[in-house]
Amino acid sequence: MVFAAADDRYEKLPYRRVADTGMILPTLSFGLWRNLGDEKPLSNSREVILKAFDNGIFSFDNASNYGPSAGSAEETFGAVFEKDLKPYRNELVITTKAGFHMWPGPFGEFTSKKTMVQALDLSLQRMHLDYVDIFYAHRFDPETNVREVAESMDLLVRQGKALYVGVSNYTTAQFNAIAEIFEELGTPFVGNQVSYNMLNREIEDDGLLEAAAKHRAGVIAYGPLAEGLLTDRYLDGIPADMPLHWSNKLMLDQGPEQVVAKLNALNNLAKERGQQLSQLALAWLLKDERVPSVIIGASSVNHLLDNVRFSDNMTLSDSEIKIIDDILSGK
């Protein structure tokens, strides 16, 4: 059956410009980090990806190491793109990243010039693309000087393989250092993709939001639901063996009982707003215009649509923001 996108797809979600750049993102982007590589049937992945596009999500985020087998998430997206989304390429923002382990040997990770050039070439092949809209350095490279990383990414833009570049998981100091080189080179740089949610607010203390604004870039938040903690699944307790992404490990340091108490208080506020806790968590992140987009994942259409419905009530009053701050600070 030939896919035809919904005519009202741009009426489902608001979208935002990244600072004053030409890049525009939907408030929700779709990430292929989990559940859409070689561990799920292609038919399931296709259904969720196409439903996302039908509901105003025109930005799809990938990485060379997503899978679980490295590259398999890109292959999944490439299969759906080739069969269904190719006629809509001009509407899509397709992003990928390189830096975590991708293939054997010393060039199979981090961000040397050789690694970045080869990684993007492979990503383009897997996704059946001529270019990506944003190419990210997936993590800071402690061994390669930051100028080489920046110049490598600038080269890929000049070769037409990426329209914009970004970084991911960079601290504010690391972000500032590479942003200054991008500005010197004239490279179109749009932001830092980082872990950010109600329970993980490290970037606020680090000053990243202010740094992004200074460099006319954005903060693109991944992990907005703290891997499911910011849903109604853990209101009765958090399993001792719950696997957490490395960026969220510290959130349980205060003790799981305190986190559960916060979740219940937040859930009560969400109910008062006629929302699910997850929808409140998304609205909270997007209260700040310096966050142009939040990357969500979904393994089912129902999960996806629950997230999209956050936009039915995404405005938070000053009093609600204060209530949330008090809950999160343990007052």
Image (cartoon, grey):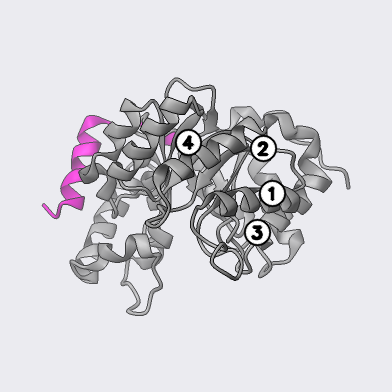
Name the foreground residue: 27 vs 68: 68
Is residue 22 visible in the rendered image? The answer is: yes
Quick one: label 2 or label 4, which is nearer the N terminus?
Answer: 2
Which residue position holds label 1?
121
Q: Are marks 2 and 1 in contact (CB under 8 Å)?
A: yes
Q: Nearer the viewer, mark 4 or mark 3?
A: 3
Distance, label 2 to label 4, CA atoms, is: 33 Å
Label 1 element class: helix
101 relative position to 47: left or right: left
**Labels 4 and 3 touching (C-beta < 8 A):** no
- The disc, 2 or 1, on the residue closer to the chain's N-terminal end is 1
Crowding at mark 2 (Cα within 10 Å: few <14, some 14-19, many 20+) = many
Image side of residue 324 versus residue 106, left or right? left
Question: Which mark, residue 161?
Answer: 2
The quarter of the picture where residue 29 lies is: top right
Q: Give the range drawn in magenta.
A: 311-331
Give, as a three-letter code, the residue at label 4. Answer: Ser
The reply to whether the magenta stretch includes residue 205 is no
Q: Residue at x 31, y 66 (%)?
A: 249
Furthest-bottom residue in view?
241
Q: Name the residue under label 3.
A: 73
Residue type at mark 3 is Ala
Q: Name the residue under label 4.
A: 311
